[in-house]
Image: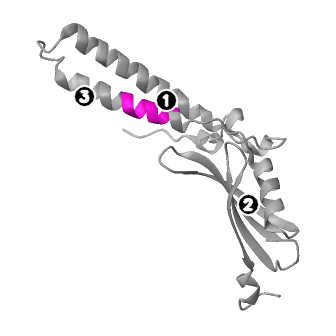
Amino acid sequence: MAEPEDDADDEVRDSLPEDLDASGFVGPYRFPDNSRRRIPGAIYLAVAAGCLALWLVRGEDGVMVNEGLAWVALALGAFGVFCYVAGRHLGADETEALVAATRTVGFPVGHASAQLGWRGLASRPTWRILLYSSEEPPRQRGLVLVDGVDGEVLQHFVEENPEQDWPGSEG
């Protein structure tokens, strides 16, 4: 049996939905708030409460409901509490963190980059700001850690830019 030729293959195009197409986005990027981590935490806590309630009602007599369900409730509850604690509200956005970092380094800032990370057992949000001085090529660079909850500068490090001495650089 012969397969029919399909000339319509040239017309088929794969495209992103409008809400996922970033090329048409206009305006400043809004970094998602860290507190959205509380949503899965609440779900884990609800499932843990359901497992515990089922175990308490059915007891240890059943085949499907036994002591293992209580252990699952305990584990899900502990992880749910962790998610809820780790989902602190992001009090300082990247712009506020950049301003705090600029005040700390002590040189006029040219290029800068911000990255959100987490520190400690409670996963406290922390901005990592990498800054270069405004000269071309930059003479200094700095790394500043800014607390994402209250905007306090935690640590900073400033040095002469070693990249200006690399072969092929103009400095």
Up-down relation of residue 1 to residue 161 (above or below): above
Q: Which tag, 1 or 2, sits closer to the chain's start?
A: 1
Q: Is residue 85 left or right of residue 26?
A: left
Residue farthest along the top direction in this orientation: 57
The majority secondary structure of the magenta stretch comes to helix
Report if the CB atoms under discs 1 and 2 are less than 8 Å apart.
no
**Magenta region:** 77-84
Q: Which tag, 3 or 1, sits closer to the chain's start?
A: 1
Residue 29: % across, % down: 77, 43
The residue that label 3 is drawn on is: 71
Tell me the element at label 2: strand
Residue pictured at 55% horizontal, 40% vertical: 6
Q: Is residue 23 left or right of residue 20?
A: right
Residue 18: % across, % down: 71, 34
Task: State the separation of the CA atoms marked 1 and 2.
Answer: 29 Å
Task: State the separation of the CA atoms marked 3 and 1.
Answer: 19 Å
Up-down relation of residue 102 to residue 137 (above or below): above
